[in-house]
Image: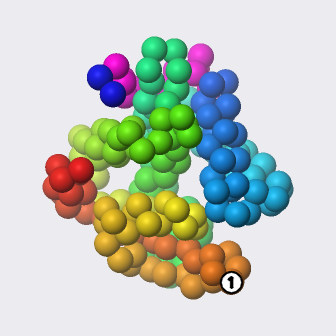
């Protein structure tokens, strides 16, 4: 972890980031037991590609990515942008004006060694520096939901069986000051 650098992506990183998206999304779907949903996998990858393109074209104004790198290997990514339509609709627009932290992806080879936490801490500070006081975060992946519940507690919104029987969707509303405080403990 000593050689990990957290930085903004450059145009030259786009190909490797898109490869990371494909690897992590495909791996996540397999671990969730939904690896056969090939169209959903491709939709998710395309959404992340579009987010990255938006970041690079707007220089971080529309979407804002941070990446974790070790030498020339991209280990993970995180981004924030406007709250998704799913979040807005599911919360009756209560979170519509918040930014959403997402695309918290860590390459399978680097999972469970603190890369995700390092990305989160860096994003909290970036948001704070931009004057953001609270953000939202959501997940439909059961494995990720367990991580978010451990970090942020019970979700503010639970959409039971949203993705099918036993596949809930969870949404959290988080104050930056609380997130920074919690990040000191992990």
Relative to 44, say whether 97 is above or below: below
Place residue 51 in its image quadrant. top right
Assign the N terminus to one quadrant of the image: top left
The residue under the point 48% across, 47% down is: 104
* Rendered image quadrant of residue 177: bottom left
Considering depth in this image, is 181 or 56 the residue closer to the camera? 181
Magenta residue check for 32: no
Q: Nearer the viewer, residue 46 or 129?
A: 46
Chain part drawn in magenta = 3-14
- 109 relative position to 6: left or right: right
Residue 160 image position (x, y, % from top left): 57, 85
The residue at 59%/16% (across/down) is: 12
Which is nearer the eye, 88 or 36? 36
Q: Is residue 63 left or right of residue 48?
A: left
Q: How is the image coloured?
A: rainbow
Q: Is residue 162 visible?
A: no
Q: Residues within 10 Å of mark 1 (few under 14, many from 20)?
A: few
The location of residue 170, given as percent across then percent down, is: 49, 73
Between 2 and 127, the residue placed more toward the observer is 2
Q: Is residue 168 visible?
A: yes
x then y, percent, for residue 138: 49, 65
Q: Quadrant of residue 21?
A: top right
Which residue in the protein does label 1 denote? 165
Residue at 73% across / 63% down in the picture? 34
Residue at 62% in and 43% down: 24
**Residue 9, relative to residue 119: is it above or below?**
above
Determine whether the residue tagged by mark 1 lies in a helix, strand or loop.
loop
């Amino acid at each position: 972890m000593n050689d990990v650098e957290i930085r903004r992506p450059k145009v030259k990183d786009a190909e490797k980031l898109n490869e990371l998206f494909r690897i992590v999304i495909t791996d996540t779907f397999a671990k969730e037991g939904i690896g056969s949903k090939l169209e959903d996998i491709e939709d998710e990858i395309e959404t992340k590609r579009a987010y990255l393109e938006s970041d690079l074209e707007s220089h971080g104004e529309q979407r804002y990515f941070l990446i974790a790198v070790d030498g020339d290997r991209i280990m993970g990514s995180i981004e924030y942008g406007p709250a998704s339509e799913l979040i807005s609709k599911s919360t009756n627009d209560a979170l519509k004006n918040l930014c959403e932290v997402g695309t918290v992806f860590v390459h399978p080879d680097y999972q469970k060694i603190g890369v995700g936490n390092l990305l989160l801490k860096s994003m909290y500070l970036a948001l704070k520096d931009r004057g953001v006081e609270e953000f939202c975060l959501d997940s439909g992946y059961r494995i990720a939901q367990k991580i978010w519940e451990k970090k942020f507690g019970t979700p503010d919104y639970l959409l039971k069986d949203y993705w099918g029987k036993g596949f809930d969707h969870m949404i959290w509303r988080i104050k930056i000051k609380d997130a920074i405080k919690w990040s000191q403990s992990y």
